[in-house]
Image (cartoon, rainbow, N blue to C red):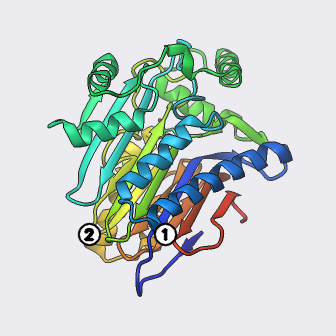
Amino acid sequence: MSADTAACPVPVLVIHGGAGTLTRGAMSTEQEARYRAALRNILQAGQLQLAAGASAVDVVVEAVRQLEECELFNAGKGAVYTAAGTHELDACVMDGRGCRAGAVAGVSRTRNPILAARAVMQQSAHLLFVGAAADDWAARHGIEQVDRAWFGTPHRLEQLHRAQQLQAGVLRDHDGQELVHGLQSSQASGPIDEQTKFGTVGAVALDAEGHLAAATSTGGMTNKQVGRVGDTPLVGAGTYANDATVAVSCTGTGELFMRACAAHDVSALVAYAGLSLAEACERVVMQKLPPDAGGLIAVSARGEVCLLFNSEGMYRGYVRCGDVEPLVAVYRSE
Ligand code: ASP
């Protein structure tokens, strides 16, 4: 899914709700309708904000906050569990105007990690806070804290138990990183496999003043080792925005996106190699990242959008100001 409106960029919002192994027909019609409705509602709210002149930063933060509040996705409420049965959440926001960014990693009490990330960007001389200190910093700056149990859902707990059973049988004595890859390769055959469905959420936007922004939030990977941090909160890996080039938010196996510096690579290919947004995304997702790594959403300073993945599916959609309906999709073939 990609589109080009080079002549006169119209404000646009693009969102994702994670990529992974999603085969048509494997999800119940009701479940699929819930995902599509959630994406559509969030896009419509963002469209209204953009039409009213909201900044790209405000729009991506609000879209991600709403995705964090929605249990369907792996961020905020409904986030996946660590191997210890806890939650460690990561988030990042980047403003293309001046390339300012804020991020938190491994928070476990902050209700909306993306709000903490924005506060770090706007109120701190630092860029990234981690762990309990990040929760404390957020609390001191007025960001709502919740009981650790707040993030959990029975569905995610069951997912953890399934992942642990599988690993006990198939991947004994492997370290954390191999477990991550084991989860992918050993379960890729299922029609819709929760272990390979990355429900990380993200948003990128271009506003009426021509500014870009990107935001990403995640619970990480099911059964990840305590203390593991993925690509999401790392500028240039899972999240990047620069008014001169692009805004990018990634989803997939974080270790692969970190090694590829995936989000910044898209920007660099546009800036230094003169590639179009579609060409730059194609190079990174289809040529640089290994198969089944995941995907990304991106918007360029010219208003082009790209939603590209090398996994089976990705929850995704976009809407421009003036569109009658947002475009929402899940599977590869739509
Ligand atoms: N990229 C995230 C991580 O590795 C996971 C995801 O996209 O679902 O933490």
Instruction: Give neighbour class at mark 1: few <14, some 14-19, many 20+ (Cα, 10 Å).
Output: many
Q: Label 2 is placed on what type of residue?
A: Ala
- Position of residue 239 measured from the top left corner of the image (x, y, whole percent): 37, 49
Identify which residue is drawn at 74% across, 45% down: 34
- The foreground one among 82 and 70 is 70
Identify which residue is drawn at 43% across, 38% down: 255
Circle number at residue 244: 2
- Position of residue 122 measured from the top left corner of the image (x, y, whole percent): 23, 42
Which quadrant of the structure image shows residue 98? Answer: bottom left
- Position of residue 127 measured from the top left corner of the image (x, y, whole percent): 22, 38
Q: Is residue 122 left or right of residue 114?
A: left
Element on which disc 2 rests: loop
Q: How far apart are the alpha carbons under marks 2 and 1?
A: 15 Å
- The relative height of residue 331 versus residue 65 in the rendered view (above or below) is below
Mark nearer the N terminus (2 vs 1): 2
- The relative height of residue 53 versus residue 173 in the rendered view (above or below) is below
Circle number at residue 305: 1
Identify which residue is drawn at 65% across, 56% down: 40
Q: Label 1 is placed on what type of residue?
A: Val
- Position of residue 163 measured from the top left corner of the image (x, y, whole percent): 66, 22
Q: Is residue 139 left or right of residue 41?
A: left
- The foreground one among 289 and 331 is 331
- The foreground one among 313 and 87 is 87
